[in-house]
Image (tube, helix red, strand yellow):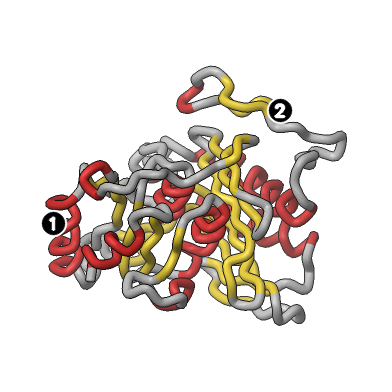
Amino acid sequence: MKLRGVYGAPPIHTLKFDKSGSMSNVSALLNIMINAARKAARGLSRDFGESQALQVTKKGLADFVSRADHAAEQTIFETLSESRPKYGFIMEERGEIEGSDNSNRWIVDPLDGTTNFLHGLPQYAISIGLERDRQAYAGVIYNPSTNELFWAEKGQGAYLNDRRLRVSGRQDLNECLFACGLPFAGRPGRDRALAEADKVLEATAGVRRFGSAALDLAFVAAGRFDAFWERDLNIWDVAAGAAIVREAGGIVTDIDGGGDFLSGGSILATNSEIYDKAKALLK
């Protein structure tokens, strides 16, 4: 199977699949996660760009959830449950489902970047993480529009399609590109977020706000961004991306330097060279 590049460009990589449709060079666990993401992507790809036809309900001010979102989550839930029936879940739309396996939980965001998706912007992703013993253990982030598949498992490295990933090696903040999230209408924390962004803009090569925390983290792992920070996030926003960044050689904590970024509500992910400088800048 050839994965085509951005917006129909020539193939970037060729992934190797066996007769069952599994990738031949990854673990059984990752194959399950990748298969779930690929299945969910079929429906999202059909609906992408058709925002006027989607059955959209308002979940909150400037925060929408679509029929496509729910359908993708159902597909992921069914696929993962069939393969690992004892694992629990935390999902954006249906919440927490306890499993008989107390060590493993799937962390699922079926459509990260919903607003982008509904506006026809190809910056959205399916994010599937595995939390093992309350630690980010494995992650898959897939953008159907670009066919970029980011994946990692603890101790096995991080990959974009079949290419090994490493975070950037930039050391000087004035050469670094940061990504962030900014609160939209109706969300608290805007003054603090703008103040932080102003400090980062003063010290770096720039700040990007793309609207998908999962892809922002994947881009840190790929060396496209040197750092990403955001507050008031949920576990499904960061679980997969954190695993991928760490396996790519990056550092992931909460903004204050603590280890509880999965439930603490904030995250700072950087390459290994600028972490202390980035943390001090945001303090």
Residue placed at 36% from the left, 38% from the top? 121
Amino acid of disc 2? Met
Look at the numbered disc 2 and give the secondary structure of its residue.
Answer: loop
Residue placed at 42% from the left, 48% from the top? 220
Image x and y of residue 203, in percent:
16, 52
| Residue 6 in the image: above or below residue 112 | above
Q: Nearer the viewer, residue 136 or 32?
A: 136
Q: Farthest residue toward the top?
A: 10
In the rendering, which numbered label is found on residue 114? Answer: none
Amino acid of disc 1? Asp
Residue bearing mark 1: 198
Q: Farthest residue toward the right?
A: 19
What is the crowding at mark 1: few (fewer than 14 residues within 10 Å), some, or many (at least 20)?
few
Residue placed at 79% from the left, 53% from the top? 28
Q: Is residue 210 left or right of residue 4?
A: left
Residue bearing mark 2: 1
Residue 230 in which image quadrant: bottom left
Residue 170 in which image quadrant: top left
